[in-house]
Amino acid sequence: MNNLPKAFDDFSEARRNSFIKVKDYKDEGEHIVGIFCTFTPIEVIYAAGAHPISLCGMSDETIPDAERDLPKNLCPLIKSSYGFALTDKCPFTYFSDIIVGETTCDGKKKMYEYLNQIKPMHVMQLPQATDREHALSVWKNEIIILKERLEEEFNVKITDDDLKKAIKKCNEERIALKELYSLSKICPPPITGMELHTVLHGASFTFDKDEQNKKIMDMVEQLKEEHANGVRKVEEDAPRILITGCPMGGVADKLIPIIESNGAVVVCYENCSGIKEKSRLVDETKDPVEAIAEKYLNVGCSVMAPNDNRIELMSELIDEYKVDGVIDVILQACHTYNVETRRIKEFVTEEKDIPYMSIETDYSQADEGQLKTRVAAFIEML
Amino acid sequence: MYYAGVDIGSTAAKTALFENDKLIDAFVVPTGWSSIETANTIKEKIISKGIKEEEMKVVATGYGRVSVPYAHKTITEITCHGKGAAYLTGEDCTVIDIGGQDTKVITVENGMIVDFLMNDKCSAGTGRFLEIMANTLGVDIDTLCDLAETGGDISISSMCTVFAESEVISLIGRGEKKEDIAYAIVDSIISKVASLCNKHSEGTNYYLTGGLCECDYIVRSLSEKLKSPVKTNPMARYAGAIGAGVLAQKIK
Ligand code: SF4
Ligand code: SF4
């Protein structure tokens, strides 16, 4: 029986459903750890017996509140996240026992100073680059400090065994999700970019990962079957787009439909709301702290300078997903990604020899008309 | 067969008519309050030339492109301006289109659009900016350009149209010469356009399209700012419509 529509709905409802779940957990005395970023080693949180949940602000609803404390020309993700904490409008933030952040971009790390006045916070100090030998040992130490902080907060002892179990669990989720997003390598993809986003995004808000993995594997089977039976959701010749840049949870509903209604299809999300972190596993054969440190230090985010890991991952993805054009999504006032557009443009157009476009946008609808024209023109060019 | 390119811009609606692959006519009407009405006026004009609706394919472009009910296809003004410029020059070029609402820089290679850049939300550096400033000075755009040619020496520092307008008002209040203020206005828009060009890439063979192409002074000062000759052609204001007409020939 085809229950794909319902399966997609489950993922688009995941965030809302988890609101109730999070309260149940709290009532049962379990712990919630709020996180903001792909650098957060969630394995350590699981190993402490707690539940990690993403707090990234994705709506402009709380931005005016945040702007009382924060400057206007700051990235909407930072303002929105802070606004949710300030106004108690996000149940995840509200129920978090502690929030873990990292010294990534300047805006975020300074915002954490204020967030710390509202909620208990733990800020990990992230190295600025990966190329010094000490970067890895610094990050390893930070992971140990996080481990100790969680042990103290939740009054538990985290053993190597706990860490190894958590690593295995997280890898299982990564593998399941990879089965799904890899389907877009097929031409035409059996899944639209919007559907793919819904699942990847929903997965950052679910708690029961075993159930989630099962749902995803079912979904993969059904999508394969549909495809084999000749069902085509996407035109054979639809230009294949890779999206890179800032986390796009807050602009996905605006942007993806514009791309896909103009006849193209998003086959890959290289960003943090996509597969940036999910595409690499944590080595299960190594010392767990070492393995975790290694994996997260190598996330290809623009806060690292230089950021060769992003180029490396993009290079693989562009080939594997037979990408026809790259769209770099920059949230307004995100300096690191914005500065990096030049390098990405050169890499994409010169080394990969395909068209590239960057767009700077925010959570409002104000630029929708202009985005439509720009995206349509880009797709006409492909 | 006839092919029509209809480019509904924010202030002017341009039409280019082809008989097979030959450009036979081009005309402009002002865009009124309603884009649909403007589109219908255009249709009547075409029909009055003895062309039947059934023997014509239409591509609509420009910001009002969705309001042309009889269009067979809509294509963005970016693609159409690029194609139109390629038709007019017949060579690789970097198209600069100063439109009423936005300004774009488009790279054309072998008749294909390979890259483009558009200004942000803001109206500085667009035709709208010139229009507002000309209004403030109480002249039309052509006169503004003529005045600018003999002026010099002052500049407007605000990038934002609203602030620039009050700057112009205070310059008038201070008794500055109209010519000098006009010079400052044109200089401001040209600098903004040039910086968009520089951001885009190292342009070669610049080609100006849009309503300002007939203003010699604009073309000259843009060449100076870019340190590279800017070409244009009186037909270049129809580039979007011509490009749309060229693309209409591909409709089956
Ligand atoms: S883009 Fe960088 S800072 Fe932002 S969530 Fe991803 S890894 Fe963290
Ligand atoms: S999008 Fe950019 S500015 Fe915003 S939080 Fe991420 S790295 Fe920082």
Image (cartoon, rainbow, N blue to C red):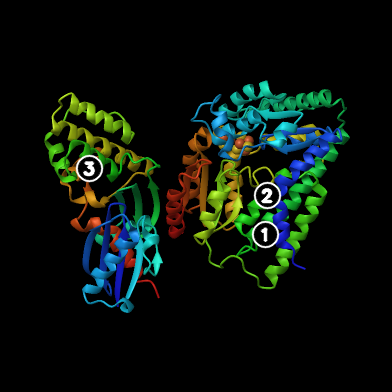
Q: Residue drawn 71% across and 36% down? A: A91
The quarter of the picture where the N terminus of chain A appears is bottom right
Output the chain of dot 1: A
Number of residues whose C-alpha sits closer than 10 Å to that of mark 1, classed few (under 14), some (14–19) or many (20 or more): some
Residue A195 placement (x, y as % from top left): 64, 56
Residue B70 placement (x, y as % from top left): 36, 69
Q: For the residues tagged 3 and 2, is the chain the same?
A: no
Q: Is residue B133 visible?
A: yes
Q: Which mark is residue B223?
A: 3
Report the residue marked by disc 2: A200
Q: Residue drawn 18% across and 56% down? A: B234
In the foreground, B72 or B19: B72
Report the residue marked by disc 1: A183
Q: For the residues tagged 1 and 3, is the chain the same?
A: no
Q: Secondary structure at mark 2?
A: helix
**Residue type at tag 3:** Ser
The quadrant where residue B226 appears: top left
Q: Is residue A306 visible?
A: no
Q: Which mark is residue B161?
A: none
Output the chain of dot 3: B
* The image quadrant in which ligand 1 is located: top right
Q: Which is more foreground, mark 3 or mark 2?
A: 2
Left or right: A326 in relation to A180: left
Q: CA distance from mark 3 to mark 2?
A: 50 Å
Q: Secondary structure at mark 3?
A: helix
Q: CA distance from mark 1 to mark 3?
A: 51 Å
**Residue type at tag 2:** Leu
